[in-house]
Every structure is written in C-alpha cells, then in structure tokens.
Image (cartoon, rainbow, N blue to C red):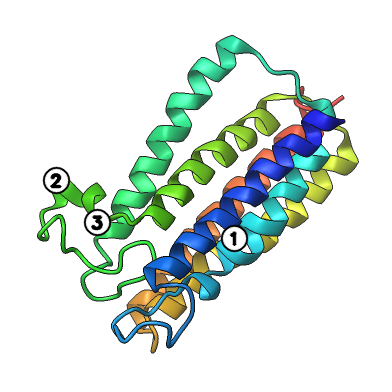
Amino acid sequence: MWEQWAAISLLVSLVFIGGICSLVEGTFYPGQSTDNKIKLWFVLHGGVVFGDLILIPLAVWMWYESINFSLGRLLITCPLAIAITWFCHRGWWFACKDQPGYMYPNQKYSKGDPKFWYRDLPVSAWIHVVYMIVSTMWIAEYIFNPMPADVVKKTFDIFVAFVPLAIIEPGIVQGWPPTKKDITNSCTIAVGLWVLIGLVTWGKLVHWWIF
C-alpha cells in the first residue's frame, strides 16, 4: 500500500513543485507579471491544475494493484514516453511566439531557432516534462496490463474528461480571443484522442487486455 501512496505522492508533488516554480517565475496567475503577453498562466491550464493534479493520480490509484511491472516492457515504454513528451513540448514551442504561456513565456534563449527550442523551457516547464514522461509510462502500463472491467470503464470516463481539460481548454485560453483555427485545431486533436481512448477501451473490454 505504501508503494501505491508513493506513486500518487510523486505525481501530486510534481504538480505542486511546478506550481511553486511558476509562481517564482512570475507565470502562475494573471496579473502576477507585467508581461501581458502571457495568455496561458499556470492556474488557467486545466490539464495541469485538474488533470495532472486530480485525474491522472486517481487513474494510477485504480490501476496500481492490477499492474505487473516488466523490465523488458519498461525498456520499451520509457524511451517511447520520452519521445512522445519531446514531440509534444517541441510542438508547443511553435505557438510561443504569438501565444506565450507559462511553459514558454518567450523565445529569448533559443533566439527563435527551432533547433534550440528546449532552451526556452523554464524550470516549471521542465517539471512538466518529467511529469509527462512518468504519467505516459503509467498509461502504457495500463494499456498492456489486464484490468477489471469496472476499472476500464472508470478509466474511460477519466480520460474523456481529461482531453478537453488538457487540449481544448488550454488551446482556447492561450489563443484568447480564439480564432477559428485555434478552435478547429484543438477540437480536431481532442476528437482524435477520444477515438484512441475509445479504441483502447474497446480492446480492453472485448480482447485479451481484460480478465
């Protein structure tokens, strides 16, 4: 049981540490900084404040007893989680110039060069990088471990709720007032993720991913 609590505490602690770093960096809440270019402040990012702090830890709590860790699988899921996290954070960098957020307040250190996008990540954003790697590995473990049907159904509800908090809400807030392109892009990604969540849920309910 202590290991289960330790796993949840790690995730929750990372969010709090990221928040403290954001507060110090002046990107935590609207009005904290005189830099009015920032649109997506830490407290306005639903995916972080509600998703990372509440929904993901809740899901991990439900999965924990059903997961059997495998060194061979971890050697695959860890690089995969790092690659997904790298891809996402690099992609978010390109929106920084016109729509700065707490993860990319500016492009000062990269001087606008995409090859050096990672130089613009403040400490709070690096905390998010660590969180995303860890949580993505947990999601991979969920996918490839058999789960009881009730856990699969509850997980479906959690991630259906997580998607708009992590994709649609931040996309609209960061692009406020949102353009048609902002809304279309956010909703398109959200729908794609919902389809993926549905397929994984179906696979675990009717195939060998469930016991």
Give the residue number, with chain letter if any, for mark 2.
115
Q: Nearer the viewer, residue 121 or 70?
A: 121
- How many angstroms separate mark 1 from mark 3 (CA)? 26 Å
> Is 78 situated left or right of 142 in this image?
left
Give the residue number, with chain letter if any, for mark 3.
120
Residue at the limit of the structure toward the front, as seen here: 24
Q: Is mark 2 on a helix, strand or loop?
A: helix
Residue type beneath disc 3: Asp
Residue occupying image coordinates x 43% and y 25%: 79
Residue 208 in picture, x, y percent from top left: 77, 22
Q: Is mark 3 on a helix, strand or loop?
A: helix
Residue 141 in picture, x, y percent from top left: 66, 28
Q: What element carries label 1?
A: helix
Determine contact: label 1, label 3, CB under 8 Å.
no
Residue type beneath disc 2: Lys
Residue occupying image coordinates x 62% and y 55%: 52
Q: Can residue 160 be seen in this view?
A: yes
> Is 12 situated left or right of 5 in this image?
left
Q: How crowded is mark 3: few (under 14 residues within 10 Å), some or many (20 or more)?
A: many
Q: Which of label 2 and label 3 is nearer to you? A: 3
Q: Which of label 1 and label 3 is nearer to you? A: 3
Residue occupying image coordinates x 38% and y 80%: 39
Q: Which mark is residue 163?
A: 1
- How many angstroms separate mark 1 from mark 2 (CA)? 29 Å
